[in-house]
Amino acid sequence: MVDVRALIRRRNNLAGNFRAVPGLAFGRGLVPFTGAVEFKDQPDAPRKFAPHYEQFIRPRVVEFETSRVAAVKSSRTRFFFFLPLAVLVVLAAVALANWHPQVGLAVGLVGLFGLWAWVYWPIGSYKSSVKEIIYPEIFKFFGDDYVYFEDGPLSVASLKPSGIIPSYDNSHVEDYVKGSYKDVGLELTEAKLTEERGSGKNRSTVTVFRGIFVLFSANKNFSGQTIVRKDSGRIGNWLRDKFNKLENVALEDPKFEKKFEVYSDDQIEARYLLTPSFMERLLTLSDLFRGSGVQCSFYDNRLLLMIASTHDRFETGSAFVPATFVDEIDTILEEMSLIFQIVDTLKLNERTGL
Amino acid sequence: MSWTILIIVLVIVGGLYAWYAGMIGKRNKALEALSGIDVQLKKRSNLIPNILTIAQKFMDHEKSLLTEITELRAGVDKDYDKKDAGAVQQHLALAEQLSSGMGKLMIAVEAYPDLKSDAVMIQAQQTYNEVEGQIAASRRFYNSSVTALNNSVQIFPGSLIANMASIVPMPFYEADEASKAPVSAGDYLK
């Protein structure tokens, strides 16, 4: 059976990576690597990554380095075919444009895009195999319960009951991680939500959310729903109140009230969850993700954090550098440290009631 | 001219009615919040006999504290008139004194290692902390509702309407003087 999501993912990878052009043109990255490696372990990490690397990653380096060099060579060969073929496509597009401009433009764009996809295919496949085989090994460093999938089982539709998912038509999720930290279960995925707006010629696709969803198991029992949204100003909040089935919760902290609006179906439970200390911690978290919108929802005994960000997380390193996976590992160590900081900042592992 | 006066009168009457309706809504909200507190106080009240039963087995020198807690619990459990501000204030003050007494008991437990490590006591303390968290949340909701009610009752022309409709400000649920004072752990760890 054809895995449609994998095909779409591969197409996205292919379309997006035009940064490969200099490497392909000048033959960079064709020399296999044999030297030593170092990692940017987080300062407060309980153990170093190096022993894990030697045990689980190093044995696969030679195999992946061989396939990387083969992929770069193959893409490079295709790149030199690409140049004359691209000229032919452009000439054909210009000829067609004389007959029908829109057809000419469409043929030109589809042709060039298709050609580039063909050139980049070997590198794209290599990168996918890194995510499929190496990433799960890297994530095992954080615990045996960790799993990683390039396309995760966490769908945006399943998060809708949280009440903080904006209205959208299409969703694309990738980089799913599941595990636990200090006995707090966590699941996270990157997501992009888009919505079709307008009609006819004015129809356009608007990104309504891009960032990460992080789902934590909660340390408190609760039955209702409480959501914390970005403050939308007086008029925005008033309009939201009017169309919200949940009731607005006025909290005591003016700094918190300035940044967030809280809605709940249980006024007491909302205050039980959002204690003065927890409000302080949410403000700290919001500073940690400076410039990003942090929103959250307590529902079904879980806490969902929705963090807006344009930063592409958990991406593979360049195919034009040796397959040591140091870049990938450093990125993952850094990203996961940030996720663990959320647990620490919000003290999700404590049952203190504070 | 007469139409203008009629419209002005209608606007004023409409405004006063809206204010009155808002005041009733806020009072009902405060009463709802007060009921929320009572639900949690009842939970705590049901939990206290279990804690006292375990504590009595180990604590020989805290008899007066245990007696005080038993008496305060009986006081908090008594019925009271929710619309009488004085009765509400007295009820909340007793609840706060009980809270303070339980706080002292929990600190005193530290001086009895056998009691502190007793599995039933550990479980009871965890449940107690959970209920205290719920009481704190109910108190915040109540105080927030009382602030809204009192503002509308005490600010003109609310004060006039409140007088006519016999709506009175409600008391806040405040920490008692004993719990505001600094605690010396040494007093309980002798």
Image: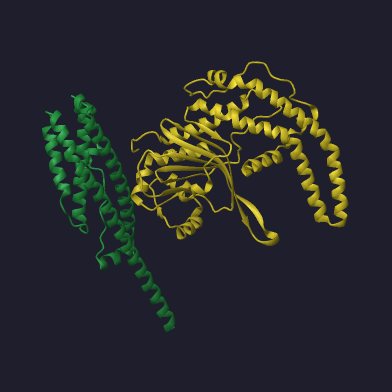
* Residue displayed at 74% across by 39% down: A117
Quarter of the image that includes the C terminus of chain A? top left
Identity of the residue furthest to the top in this view: A35
Image location (x, y in percent) of residue B53 = 15, 35
User: Which is nearer the eye, A290 or B60?
Assistant: B60
Q: Is residue A333 visible?
A: no
* Residue displayed at 62% across by 26% down: A327
Note whether A165 is above or below A63 in the view shown. below
Residue A254 placement, left or right of A103:
left
Note whether A230 is above or below A328 in the view shown. below
Q: Is residue A56 visible?
A: yes
Q: Quadrant of residue A125?
A: top right
How many marks do you count on the picture? 0
Question: Chain A colour?
Answer: yellow
Note whether A235 is above or below A81 in the view shown. below
Name the colour scheme.
by chain
Residue A297 placement, left or right of A330:
left
User: Which is nearer the eye, A197 or A58?
Assistant: A58
Question: Chain B colour?
Answer: green
Identity of the residue furthest to the front in this view: A1
Residue A209 placement, left or right of B84:
right
